[in-house]
Image: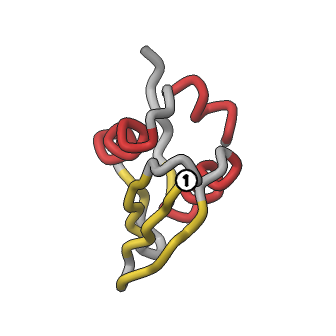
Amino acid sequence: MTKLPSLTGREVIAALSKAGFEVARVRGSHHFLIHSDGRRTVVPVHSGETIGPGLISQILRDCQISRDEFRTLL
């Protein structure tokens, strides 16, 4: 299992948008992303802060994307 890099919320959103996710709405610092097939997740965007590997793993589980597939999207 490969280690996930530390990424900002904007970098995660950019990678997920390549996989077909779109920002459906924003509430405060939380961006709600949805895919046309119904998959959805929430990504926090705080300027200057990175998202930890545990939260990135949870986002990938929500999106049903493997770590290797996510790496190709970066």
Q: Nearer the viewer, residue 59 or 45?
A: 59
Q: In which quarter of the view is residue 45 placed?
A: bottom left
Q: Residue furthest bottom?
A: 28
Q: Quadrant of the N terminus?
A: top left
Q: Estimate how packed mark 1 is, as few (under 14), some (14 to 19) or many (20 or more) residues with alpha carbons within 10 Å.
A: some
Q: In which quarter of the view is residue 51 placed?
A: bottom left
Numbered label tally: 1
Q: What residue lies at 44% left-to-right and 80% top-to-bottom?
A: 26
Q: Amino acid at mark 1?
A: His
Relative to residue 35, is residue 63 drawn left or right?
Answer: left
Q: What residue lies at 54% left-to-right and 47% top-to-bottom?
A: 37
Residue 67 in percent (x, y) is at 50, 27
Q: What residue lies at 36% left-to-right and 36% top-to-bottom?
A: 61
Identify the image's colour scheme: rainbow, by chain, secondary structure or one colour.
secondary structure
Q: What residue lies at 36% left-to-right and 85% top-to-bottom?
A: 28
Residue 23 in percent (x, y) is at 55, 69
Which type of secondary structure does the marked residue at label 1 adopt? loop
Residue 35 in percent (x, y) is at 55, 53
Residue 40 in percent (x, y) is at 42, 54
Q: Quadrant of the C terminus?
A: top right
For disc 1, the marked residue is 35
Q: Residue furthest top?
A: 1
Q: Residue furthest front?
A: 37
Q: Nearer the viewer, residue 46 or 33?
A: 33
40 over 4 or under it: above or below: below
